[in-house]
Amino acid sequence: MEFKNSILIKLLIVQCLLVCCLAQGFDFFYFVQQWPGSYCDTQQSCCYPTTGKPNSDFGIHGLWPNNDDGSYPSNCDPNNPFDQSEVSDLISSLQTSWPTLACPSGNGVSFWSHEWDKHGTCSESMFDQHGYFQLALNLKGQVDLLQILQGAGNHNLPSTFQSFFFLTNYDQFFLKMCHAKNKIL
């Protein structure tokens, strides 16, 4: 039991990395990842994307500007809706790393549109659409939760995470990422 607690503590430490953003309107980003099985267990229903069953890996849920006081900006620029052509070179990576699990099944475009419209437009002082989605993909590559946990010696991750999320009623990992001098720490 102590080993499992140690893993959870390490995971919480990873989640709590502070990010200082030099933009007006918010203080940091939450980089949110979800475990597909747990999402499906905690929702009334879920559907695999039309592109196929997601990998047994954490998927991106979002990159959310947030404030130190717990508030967050949302839907900041209705005049700049999601434009799939702005991220056309990222579509394959988005479908793999940022899959939708919502019903009815989709190819991800509605999910990414929602995330851009609600959260991405609030980071326009730092990133355009392409930059916003590219940053999330880069963070996923830099903070590989599955690899971190496997490296901790837990080789039964799917059942462990499904149980952890089910018991705590969480379906997402929140990660505060630090952005200083254009480096993600």
Image: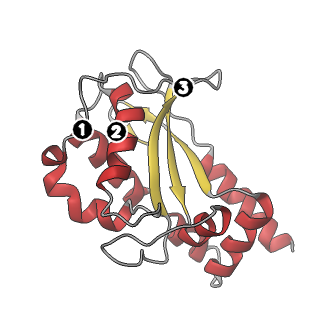
x, y percentage for residue 159?
A: 68, 80
Whether residue 145 is situated above or below residue 19 in the rendered picture: below
Q: Between residue 99 and residue 66, name the one nearer to us.
A: 99
Determine whether, in the image, residue 7 is placed left or right of residue 176. right
In the rendered image, the quadrant that contains the N terminus is bottom right
Give the alpha-carbon distance from disc 1 to disc 2, as whole Å.
Answer: 7 Å
Q: On the image, numbered disc 3 is attached to which residue?
A: 72
Tell me the amino acid under the disc marked 2: Trp
Under mark 3, the amino acid is Tyr
Q: Is residue 9 left or right of residue 46?
A: right
Label 2 vs label 3: CA separation?
A: 14 Å
Q: Which mark is residue 116?
A: 2
Of 42 and 178, which appears nearest the observer? 42
Q: Upstream in the sequence, badge 1 or badge 2? A: 2
- Element class at badge 3: loop
Q: Nearer the viewer, residue 85 or 179?
A: 85
Residue 60: horizontal and vertical position, in percent?
Answer: 44, 56
Q: Measured from the top left, where is residue 184 in percent x and y?
A: 40, 42
Q: Which mark is residue 83?
A: none
Amino acid type, callout 1: Gln
